[in-house]
Image: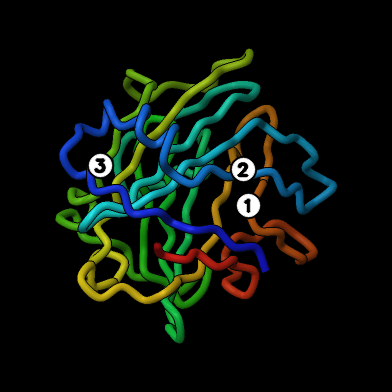
């Protein structure tokens, strides 16, 4: 099972999301989304992520460089996996449910509490509003643009939205990180922790890795 450590960076809480890149670059844990699990989809964009936590939020900074860029979906609770998309799934120890947080390159989010791929309870508008986001892509929704594109997305997810008490965190949770773009010229389904299933499916907590809180 893959593991990573989530450091505690108190300074994150006093900085604007647009300006935390330097701190995440230096102090956060960096890893890569590079597992090509299905040979039918060999394309592998360069995708890195930095992760850390503050007092009350989990911070993830995604960096992507790859062929084409698509962002049709501009409203939360939509099918952002069709676009240029990064994702974070997480599950508490001994929990039956897990949560998916999916973001296209604009920061548009699809998130839910789930028992499975089909059984879900989507976040409310108020809960979506609590997820802070900053994207380097300054645009309204747009159709696919071909060519090589580079983009960054920073998200801050409240720990209590995941069901965690910021003052009494567990030693670890379980999760995975993904990069996909289903409806583009280069569809791909890449993960941080490897998945041993016959066809693309990210909704598989049995393949989550360990995320350990410092």
Residue drawn where x is 42% and y is 83% of the image = 95
Label 2, secondary structure: give it: strand
Displayed quadrant of residue 42: top right
Picture layout, residue 59 above or below residue 208: above
In front: label 1 or label 3: 3
Give how far apart the Cα atoms at labels 1 and 3 are. 24 Å
Residue holding disc 3: 12
39 sits left or right of 207 in the view: right
Give how far apart the Cα atoms at labels 3 and 2 are. 22 Å
- Tell me residue 161's x, y (percent): 25, 64
Residue 73 appears in the figure: no
* Residue placed most toward the observer, 63 or 196: 63
- Tell me residue 81's x, y (percent): 51, 45
Q: Earlier in the sequence, mark 1 or mark 3?
A: 3
Label 3, secondary structure: give it: helix
Residue drawn where x is 43% and y is 60% of the image = 100
Give how far apart the Cα atoms at labels 1 and 2 are. 6 Å
Displayed quadrant of residue 46: top right
147 sits left or right of 93 in the view: right
Residue 113 appears in the figure: yes
Picture layout, residue 13 above or below residue 95: above
Discs 1, 2 touching: Cβ within 8 Å: yes
* Residue placed most toward the observer, 136 or 110: 136
**In which quadrant is the N terminus drawn?**
bottom right
Q: Earlier in the sequence, mark 1 or mark 2?
A: 2
Discs 3, 2 touching: Cβ within 8 Å: no
Label 1, secondary structure: give it: loop
Residue holding disc 1: 192
Residue holding disc 2: 32
């Amino acid at each position: 099972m893959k593991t990573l450590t989530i450091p505690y960076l108190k300074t994150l809480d006093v900085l604007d999301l647009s300006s935390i890149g330097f701190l995440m670059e230096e102090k956060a844990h960096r890893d890569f989304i590079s597992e090509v699990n299905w040979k039918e989809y060999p394309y592998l964009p360069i995708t890195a992520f930095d992760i850390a936590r503050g007092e009350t939020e989990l911070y993830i900074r995604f960096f992507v460089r790859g062929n084409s860029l698509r962002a049709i979906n501009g409203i939360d609770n939509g099918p952002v996996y069709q676009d240029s998309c990064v994702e974070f799934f997480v599950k508490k120890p001994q929990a039956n449910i897990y949560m998916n947080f999916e973001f296209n390159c604009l920061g548009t989010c699809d998130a839910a509490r789930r028992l499975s791929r089909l059984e879900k309870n989507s976040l409310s508008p108020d809960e979506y509003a609590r997820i802070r986001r900053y994207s380097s892509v300054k645009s309204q929704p747009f159709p696919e643009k071909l060519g090589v594109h580079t983009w960054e997305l920073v998200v801050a997810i409240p720990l209590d939205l995941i069901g965690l008490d910021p003052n009494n965190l567990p030693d670890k949770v379980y999760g995975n990180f993904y990069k996909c773009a289903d409806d583009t010229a280069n569809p791909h389904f890449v993960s941080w922790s490897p998945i041993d299933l016959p066809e693309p499916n990210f909704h598989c907590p049995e393949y989550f890795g360990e995320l350990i809180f410092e």
